Image: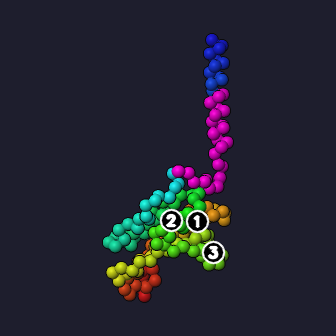
């Protein structure tokens, strides 16, 4: 009977040791390096049905696409290379104004169609200046005819 009890204790301690070892190898904070799941898809970036969808629907679709396509931990250079393959122009923003959290890169694509100008922007934020993606922000704007800045009246 005692042998069975010792065997159960040994098994429980072994399981506990494995659990602790697993915890010790997990990162505590910061951006995890990308793994196979975080790879950028090879298909072109999908802008959705922007020709017939509402401005809000196009914005929502682009935000979801950017957030799901580019996972935290990817090299910002890899993300900008992918956006450039989809006809975006990327550059670092000018000097910081001291307001908010400026992106490390702003990538923009503009298309003129049917009297409207469509502009998509992907803002790429790094983690502590380490050139790794921490988060993204997708933006979209449509201006038509006599519309003022950001689609509003003049």
Residue 88 pos. (x, y %): 48, 72
Residue occupied by mark 2: 82
Residue occupied by mark 3: 99
Left or right: 112, with 103 as reference point: left
Quadrant where the N terminus is found in the figure:
top right
Residue 134 pos. (x, y %): 59, 61
Who's the residue at 64% across and 55% down the image?
Answer: 30
How crowded is the residue under tag 2: few (<14 C-alpha within 10 Å), some, or many (20+)?
A: some
Left or right: 32, with 117 as reference point: right
Q: Which mark is residue 49?
A: none
Residue occupied by mark 1: 77
Who's the residue at 43% across and 64% down the image?
Answer: 44
Residue 17 appears in the figure: yes
Quadrant where the C terminus is found in the figure:
bottom left
Residue 28 in magenta stretch: yes
Looking at the image, tell me whether mark 1 or mark 2 is earlier in sequence order. 1
């Amino acid at each position: 009977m005692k042998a069975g009890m010792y065997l159960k204790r040994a098994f429980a301690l072994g399981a506990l040791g494995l659990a602790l070892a697993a915890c010790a190898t997990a990162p505590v904070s910061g951006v995890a390096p990308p793994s196979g799941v975080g790879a950028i898809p090879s298909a072109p970036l999908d802008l959705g049905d922007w020709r017939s969808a509402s401005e809000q629907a196009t914005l929502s679709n682009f935000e979801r696409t950017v957030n799901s396509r580019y996972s935290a931990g990817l090299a910002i250079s890899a993300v900008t290379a992918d956006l450039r393959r989809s006809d975006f122009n990327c550059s670092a923003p000018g000097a910081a104004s001291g307001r908010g959290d400026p992106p490390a890169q702003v990538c923009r694509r503009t298309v003129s169609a049917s009297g409207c100008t469509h502009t998509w922007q992907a803002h790429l934020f790094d983690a502590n200046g380490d050139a790794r993606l921490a988060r993204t922000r997708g933006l979209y704007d449509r201006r038509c005819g006599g519309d003022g800045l950001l689609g509003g009246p003049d």
